Amino acid sequence: MIRKNLIRLTSELPSDVELVAVSKFHPVERLMEAYRAGQRVFGESRPQELAAKVPQMPADVRWHFIGHLQTNKLKQVLPYASLVQSVDSVRLLEAIDRWGSVNGRVIDVLLELHLGAEDTKQGFPEEEVMAVVEAPRWPHVRLRGLMGMATNTEDAAVVEADFARIETLFHRVRRTFPECAGTFTELSIGMSGDWPLAVRHGATMVRIGTEIFGPREYF
Ligand SMILES: *Cc1c(COP(=O)(O)O)cnc(C)c1O
């Protein structure tokens, strides 16, 4: 099942769009099924769950952290994550930079844009993203691009408007700050329901869970 889903998805996705298999809430046996089918990039959203899974999976897995990250949880995430997709505040950037400085690392991150109507959603507003990229003050953080989650709705026009907004900002950043365009290259949008639309809006990375693993289970 998982293998079949991955084969279908990779055949439908343009070859230059990276597929992040969102494996949160799924047990390691299911991740291994995906691994044996060739999947190497996995996305997790809870620090403790990530730290528990890492030693149980092969060393060539690349882990992306995609959930809300509290500054007191960095040591469960930063040693393992090749990309932190969900950086949503300057406070978090500062904390990641401090951790990188202490541990001799530079951490790749995406800035999460506040998209969608839900009040609870994390993320930077547009102008704050521009300010962060304009004057980066974190030598141990590398800004690699933007991440966003569209409004949770069946209304494709609303989702499309969200993707158009983040796509516009992505290009605005790259145009306005050409000196960072070489590293600010990733646009992470699109999940199980909406990834084809995200691809049409320039996604370089999609984060797909349910369409690969089926419904999430607690374990
Ligand atoms: C859970 C999650 C996904 C995957 O959602 P699916 O609908 O299962 O594909 C993508 N992005 C983020 C940030 C998530 O938390």
Image (tube, rainbow, N blue to C red):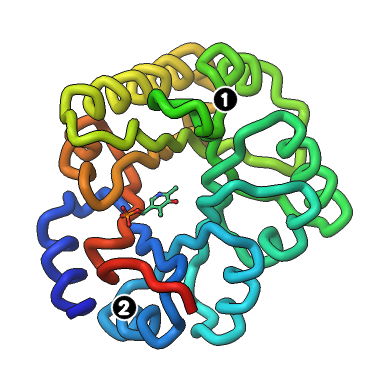
Residue at the image point whose x is 53% and y is 39% from the top:
110
Q: Quadrant of the N terminus?
A: bottom left
Local secondary structure at mark 1? loop
- Tell me the residue at 42%/74% (across/down): 26
Q: Residue furthest right?
A: 102
Picture residue at 55% right of the left edge, 53% below the top = 83
Q: Label 1 is placed on what type of residue? A: Phe
Question: Does the CB distance between marks 2 and 1 fall below 8 Å?
Answer: no
Whether ligand 1 has any atom under 8 Å from the Cβ at mark 1 is answered as no
Rendered residue at 59%/36% (across/down)? 143
Residue that carries the numbered disc 2 in the rendered image: 34
Look at the numbered disc 2 and say if its residue's Cβ is closer than 8 Å to ligand 1: no
Q: Which residue is mark 1?
A: 124
Left/right placement of residue 136 relative to residue 95 reads left
Q: Amino acid at mark 2?
A: Ala
* 63 over 207 or under it: above or below: below
6 vs 36: above or below = above
Q: Position of residue 4 (x, y in %)?
A: 14, 76
